Amino acid sequence: MRTNRVAVSAVSSWGWTFDEDLRFWDRAGIDHVGLSLRKCDRVGLGRAVERVRAAGLRVANFVECGADPARWRAAAEALGALGGGALVLTTGPGRPLDWDGSIAALGERLARVLDPAVPGVTVAIENTGPLRVDLSFVTTLRDTVDAADALGCGVCAELNSCWAERSLDATLARARARLAHVQISDWKVGSLCTPDRCVPGDGDIPLARLVRAVEATGYRGAYEIEMIGPRIENEGYAPAITRAVEYVEALVGSSVDPSP
């Protein structure tokens, strides 16, 4: 199993260690991955970079970078050393009822830590669900695009957190120039807990339509499988990831416009 535009996030094997991820990716033939800063920190970020490079892995992005700008800088430099990609950030909690103030404060933190930019690395703000205001004050894709426009950074479209938004196709089209990364998983209508993601194809999110909308923007980057929750734990990481890769690769392959 060799992934091309499909990447497997280390978050999808939440309870595994960095070493367990590497061993599984090797056994499964997965060579395109998203790294967790949380896991890399546990073995030492520099050591993690060396081992990822030695394994011949292509790195699409870093996630789980928290809200500490010092960690953002460390992750950006590590990502640059691995050839670049998307540094996917959540904003941290904002100022209640003060969008403009929250954006200004975030801009100051970004500029202080990420200037000068790391070559090959795109900073991308991720949309989160409205229950996770502890992670971010940007809880819709529409707001994420507004934030990215204000900050001059990229957008990570987390499809699980925005699929039911009004006029999503139009929002994706507006994000065209800033769309740096896409995260994909599924969800079953009726779930009352979070996170409760499932393997793509097992749930109710219209993933084929969403991928077509993403492709229509001209996006040709990675679709990162990021699954977490009891359904993934119950099935087991290895079978869940294997099924997910097969499904998403077929989905993306069938959605690509063959015209030049």
Image (cartoon, grey):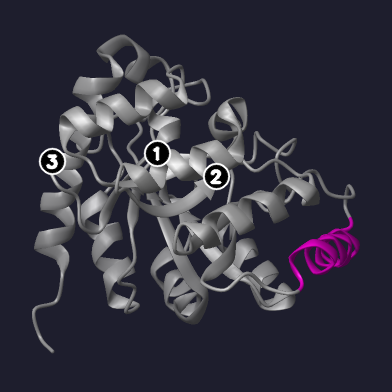
Looking at the rendered structure, which numbered label has been put on residue 226?
1
Circle 3 residue: 246
**Foreground of the two, 104 or 161:** 104
**Foreground of the two, 13 or 186:** 13
Secondary structure found at label 2: strand
Mark 1 touches mark 2? (CB < 8 Å): yes
Q: Which image quarter holds the N terminus?
A: top left
Mark 2, residues whose alpha carbon is within 10 Å: few (<14), some, or many (≥20)?
A: many
Secondary structure found at label 3: helix
3 or 2: mark nearer the eye = 2
Q: Position of residue 183 (x, y in %)?
A: 41, 50
Q: Is residue 202 visible?
A: no
Find the distance from the CA under tag 1 to the CA under tag 2: 10 Å
Q: Residue at x 48, y 60 (%)?
A: 166
Q: Position of residue 240 (x, y in %)?
A: 24, 25
Looking at the rendered structure, which numbered label has been put on residue 97?
none
Q: Residue at x 60, y 25 (%)?
A: 42
Q: Is residue 153 above or below residue 226?
A: below
Q: Position of residue 27 (x, y in %)?
A: 18, 28
Q: Residue at x 88, y 52 (%)?
A: 97
Circle 2 residue: 63
Which stretch appears magenta?
A: 98-115
Mark 3 touches mark 1? (CB < 8 Å): no
